Image (tube, rainbow, N blue to C red):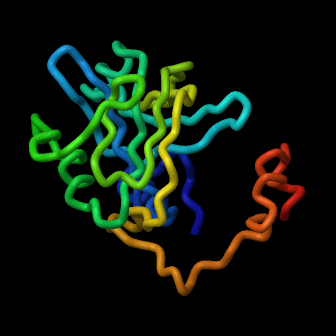
Amino acid sequence: MTVNPGALDPRTFRTVLGQFCTGVTIITTMDAEGPVGFACQSFAALSLDPPLVLFCPTKVSRSWSAIEQSGKFCVNVLAEEQQATCARFGSREPDKFAGIGWQPSPLGSPILDGALAHIDCTVEQVHDGGDHFVVFGRVSSLSELKDERPLLFYRGQYTAIEPDKTVPAPWRDDLEAFLTTTSLDTWL
């Protein structure tokens, strides 16, 4: 069944997009009153040269306002066991950091304890994206790698990787060559 774009039901749109499994991140910064952050699924790598990432906050987000003012943010990639942390940062709780351990990144944004990885950034560009902004961030520093599994979100629920069902990508053995290749088509 194909739906006419002019007649899209928002619930159907959301359900169809829920078929795409995403990682879960917490985007953080500091404002004059302390740490600020929100749960974000709309995060992606953008460029290797220069090193850029992107995320998409809603235009009415108080956390986005703080990030825009500070000009910096930290992406915290959540580990599988951080479901409660994700739920807290996805809520309307006024003090999302209550009971959450963290340390400042090199740029001063909160790195959450237990995060699988973090990516410290400065705001590079902001673009209109309907009811969201599309924010490009220039990567300033990265965390060390951990051997843990990520928290994933699929069809409105948390999920996880089943290690015995994963299949290595064809480029895995030659990661350096893959990372320097300009087109994914070369590998497919």
Q: Position of residue 75 (x, y in %)?
A: 42, 39
Residue 16, placed above or below residue 67: below
Residue 25, placed above or below residue 168: above
Residue furthest bottom as drawn: 164
Q: Residue at x 65, y 78 (%)?
A: 167
Q: Residue at x 24, y 40 (%)?
A: 102
Could you tell me which quadrant the C terminus lies in?
Answer: bottom right
Number of dots carrying numbers: 0
**Nearer to me, 129 or 70:** 70
Q: Residue at x 49, y 22 (%)?
A: 122
Q: Position of 143 compared to 94: left or right? A: right
Could you tell me which quadrant the N terminus lies in?
Answer: bottom right
Q: Residue at x 20, y 59 (%)?
A: 84
Q: Position of 86 compared to 147: left or right? A: left
Q: Position of residue 67 (x, y in %)?
A: 35, 22
Q: Position of residue 104 (x, y in %)?
A: 31, 31
